[in-house]
Amino acid sequence: MVAQVIDGKAFAANVRAQVADQVAKLKEENGITPGLAVVLVGEDPASQVYVRSKGKQTVEVGMNSYEHKLDAETSEEDLLALIDKLNNDPAVHGILVQLPLPKHLNEDLVINSIDPAKDVDGFHISNVGLLGTGQKSMVPCTPLGCLMMLRDHHGSLSGMDAVVIGRSNIVGKPMAQLLLGDSCTVTVAHSRTKDLPDVVRRADIVVAAVGRPEMVPGDWIKEGATVIDVGINRIERDGKNKLVGDVDYASAAERAGAITPVPGGVGPMTIACLLANTLTACCRANSRPEPEGLTA
Ligand code: NAD
């Protein structure tokens, strides 16, 4: 079997187009422009790239982008004061604090100070609880993107065996909750899982979110399974820098029914889903109908 390639770049472009369409309607019919505030503390180079990219795409879909760049030495008190200001600003519908934060700042405290209704990353403890209990919440962007692609490919996921490799709060755990919400039978595998190959071989859906280059070889993949590769790993091969996923793409593509490439798979979906979440937050704040197909 040669796998169908799930084109995340095209999928994300389509999500952004849907968001842009809805934003234009909100402006025209209600005079409302969704606004996303992104807070960056310090000068981590990767974070700077993400924040720039988020700002650019926010403006491209017609939303207002508010960037707050704070010094690496910023005190917790000052950061919490800024979040409080954004929580109370009616022009701001989504707030994202770029992680990781400098070590002197308590990440949990900072994230939990964001108004849950504006928590477009879905990391606030209230949103984690709402998702876990199957209630309306803000859903973390990367797992939401994976879910959208899986639903698009399969229609219903009901009754499918899904394995999520990785149990992080950002990807693995919310991904497992979303798959459970769509009635999959879910196994969460991690660094202490015994006989991972055997666990993966039983899965109709494999979501790999580990951060280890090409650790899942093709012969772990059940014939016809759908493989969603969240991993982004920089490696050097043949003297060149390359991005690879957590799955060995070449061998997995020979057995899978469908697979996301790296780059160009899950990656582009994350910011697209951040924009979708900001639109959802804005619609909820203004008692407008939620955008169809852009939420969990
Ligand atoms: P993390 O380091 O927080 O979690 C990794 C998880 O993998 C842990 O739960 C750990 O138990 C598990 N693990 C480690 N070694 C393992 C092993 N040998 N076998 C099985 N499980 C093992 O990472 P994260 O934040 O969840 O990110 C995972 C990967 O996804 C990284 O490569 C990251 O760059 C990527 N990522 C991509 C996006 C995106 O936009 N596409 C977003 C977030 C993360």
Image: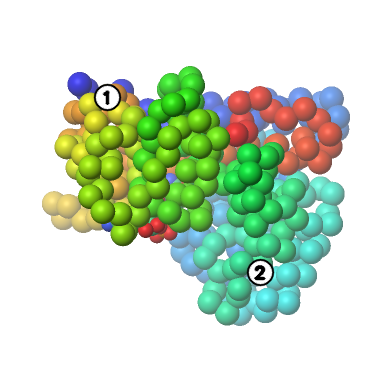
View quadrant of ligand 1? bottom left
Residue shown at 49% from the left, 67% from the top: 44
**Residue 296 seen in render:** yes
Q: Specify whether tag 2 is near ligand 1 (CB below 8 Å).
A: no
Q: Is residue 207 left or right of residue 91?
A: left
Q: Nearer the viewer, residue 294 or 8?
A: 294
Q: Is residue 23 left or right of residue 73?
A: right
Whole-percent x and y of residue 89? 83, 54
Q: Is residue 9 visible?
A: no
Q: Position of residue 8 (x, y in %)?
A: 43, 32
Amino acid found under the numbered disc labelled 2? Leu
The quadrant of the rendering that contains the N terminus is: top left
Task: Report crowding for label 1: few under 14, some 14 to 19, many 20 or more residues within 10 A (C-alpha).
Answer: many
At x 66% / y 69%, what residue is drawn? 109
Residue situated in front as seen by the camera: 166 or 185: 185
Q: Residue at 24% x, 31% y: name it.
A: 222
User: For residue 212, what is the image quadrant?
Assistant: bottom left
| Residue 252 position in % (x across, y down) | 22, 35
Q: Which residue is mark 1?
A: 224
Q: Which mark is residue 213?
A: none
Look at the image and tell me in which quarter the C terminus lies. Answer: top right
Q: Which residue is mark 2?
A: 109
In front of the other: 159 or 55: 159
Gap in Å between the C-alphas at discs 2 and 1?
43 Å
Residue lying at 60% horizontally and 46% vertically, measured from the top left: 132
In the displayed structure, would residue 224 be above or below residue 130?
above
Q: Is residue 150 above or below residue 79?
A: above
Residue 143 image position (x, y, % from top left)? 50, 42
Q: Which sits earlier in the primary sequence, circle 2 or circle 1?
A: 2
- Asked if ligand 1 lies within 8 A of label 1, the reply is no
Quarter holding residue 278: top right
Q: Amino acid at mark 1?
A: Gly
